[in-house]
């Protein structure tokens, strides 16, 4: 059963990556869509970048947590975050090869903040899991 979950998480993670790369690199015509320029005082474009990159850390952790933790121990969170940063840099610079897209350092900042927020979520979940496991299941 665990093997099925691990495989499913990996399939979902790589599907997410494929969709993310397509959305970040290909041209998306938003001229016909009416939407506000800002929400909560933040440009909608930056919120989209945040929402696209936020799941990265969580999905990578679900897909590879056991193998990364076994190999790199306490460095696993850093490895997931750094790989997310590299993906964010790659997708933002790859946009410059599409004449209809452009590089925006604030988009990359939104990507980085999303990766950090997702990494913070997995760290909090891991710490709480260890805490509650020690409190309730002490031998």
Image: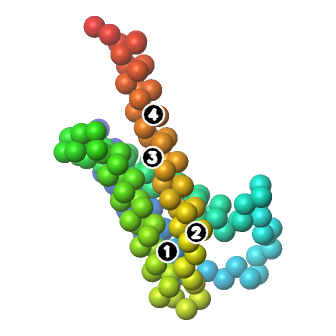
Asked which secondary structure carries label 2, the reply is helix
| Mark 4 to mark 1 CA distance (whole Å) | 29 Å
Asked which secondary structure carries label 3, the reply is helix
Q: Earlier in the sequence, mark 4 or mark 3?
A: 3
The residue pinned by badge 2 equals 107
Q: Which mark is residue 125?
A: 4
Q: Earlier in the sequence, mark 3 or mark 2?
A: 2
Q: Between residues 45 and 15, which one lies in front from this camera angle?
A: 45
| Residue beneath the point at 41% across and 29% down | 127
Q: Is residue 32 above or below residue 81?
A: below
Determine crowd level at label 2: few under 14, some 14-19, many 20+ residues with C-alpha closer than 10 A.
some
| Mark 2 to mark 1 CA distance (whole Å) | 8 Å
For the N terminus, the quadrant is top left
Residue 56: quarter of image: bottom left
Q: Is residue 10 visible?
A: yes
| Mark 3 to mark 1 CA distance (whole Å) | 20 Å
| Residue beneath the point at 54% across and 79% down | 103
Q: Earlier in the sequence, mark 2 or mark 4?
A: 2
The residue pinned by badge 3 equals 119
Determine crowd level at label 4: few under 14, some 14-19, many 20+ residues with C-alpha closer than 10 A.
few
| Farthest front residue in view | 105
């Amino acid at each position: 059963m665990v093997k099925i979950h691990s495989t499913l998480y990996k399939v979902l993670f790589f599907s997410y990556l494929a969709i993310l790369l397509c959305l970040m690199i290909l041209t998306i015509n938003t001229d016909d869509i009416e939407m506000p320029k800002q929400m909560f005082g933040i440009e909608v474009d930056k919120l989209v970048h945040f929402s696209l990159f936020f799941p990265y850390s969580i999905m990578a952790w679900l897909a590879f947590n056991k193998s990364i933790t076994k190999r790199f121990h306490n460095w696993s969170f850093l490895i997931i975050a750094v790989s997310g940063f590299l993906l964010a840099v790659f997708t933002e610079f790859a946009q410059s090869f599409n004449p209809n897209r452009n590089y925006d350092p604030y988009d990359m900042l939104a990507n980085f903040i999303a990766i950090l927020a997702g990494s913070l979520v997995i760290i909090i979940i891991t710490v709480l899991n260890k805490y509650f496991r020690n409190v309730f299941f002490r031998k």
